[in-house]
Amino acid sequence: MGSNLPFLGSAEVSDPTSIKAAAARVEELLGGSGLNILINNAGIAKPISLDKETLETMTQIYTTNTAGPLLLGQAFLPLLKKAAQGSPGSGLSCSKAAIVNMSSSAGSIEDVFIWEFGQVVSYRCSKAALNMLTKCQSLAYKEHGILCVTLHPGWVQTEMGGSSESFKPPLTVDASVQGMLKVLSSLSEKETGTFLDWEGKILPW
């Protein structure tokens, strides 16, 4: 049976060497067990309008928000496979083996959430691409017993989300985390490859 690890710090997700080192360190700490869940939470955004976007900004945001989760999924795949193989039953779940990519409703092409609040084009594009990555991972890794899902934490009162008294996002960190934990505990094979919010509602691609 695989093990759940405490938070170990963060890898530099735009650096393949750092990612490989993090995977090696986790493998060492697990001592032969597998890893049940990989949560790709790193993300950056820059409040730039469409006419001010640059190749440099797009590349930087995409590297962290999209390529990072791709590389992390690859690096931790052997440990996730090991957890899945050591878990009884054929169904998928977060207690067996899972990749959770933290996305945003701002990456929904159909919804284009809070455009009037900020265009943040590079961020939106990177999250839309992350959603597709999750779909691809769900198809490729299902045979290994690994559930893959994209999760939107809500518009949360954080440094990235905004926390000023004049314009405060509707969701506290605690409410978001509690909601996501409840969602993760209930996921099964039918949810793999889906785009869900912190309450478990399916979001439009």
Image (tube, grey):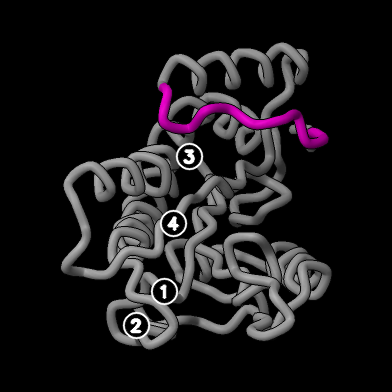
From this viewpoint, is residue 183 visible?
yes
Magenta part, dominant SS: loop
| Element type at mark 1 | helix
Which residue is at a point 43% across and 63% down the rendered structure image? 193
Q: In which quarter of the view is residue 157 placed?
A: bottom right
Task: Measure the alpha-carbon separation of dots 4 and 2.
Answer: 16 Å
**Crowding near the residue tagged with mark 2, few <14, some 14–19, many ≥20 C-alpha atoms within 10 Å:** some
Residue bearing mark 1: 106
| Element type at mark 2 | loop
Give the mark nearer the N terminus: 3 vs 4: 4
**Crowding near the residue tagged with mark 1, few <14, some 14–19, many ≥20 C-alpha atoms within 10 Å:** many
Q: Quadrant of the N terminus?
A: top right
Give me the disc on residue 45.
4
Residue bearing mark 2: 112
Task: Measure the alpha-carbon separation of dots 2 and 1.
Answer: 6 Å
Residue 151 image offset from top left, x and y in percent? 55, 65
**Magenta stretch in the rendered image:** 5-15
* Side of 157 relative to 140 (left or right): right
Which residue is at a point 58% across and 76% down the rendered structure image? 197
Give the amino acid type for the residue marked by disc 1 in the picture. Ala
Residue bearing mark 3: 144
Give the amino acid type for the residue marked by disc 3 in the picture. His
Task: Measure the alpha-carbon separation of dots 3 and 4.
Answer: 33 Å
Compare residues 202 and 117 and report the one nearer the observer. Answer: 117
Whether the residues at callouts 2 and 1 have beta carbons within 8 Å, the answer is yes
Asked if the stretch drawn in magenta spans residue 13, the answer is: yes
**Crowding near the residue tagged with mark 4, few <14, some 14–19, many ≥20 C-alpha atoms within 10 Å:** many
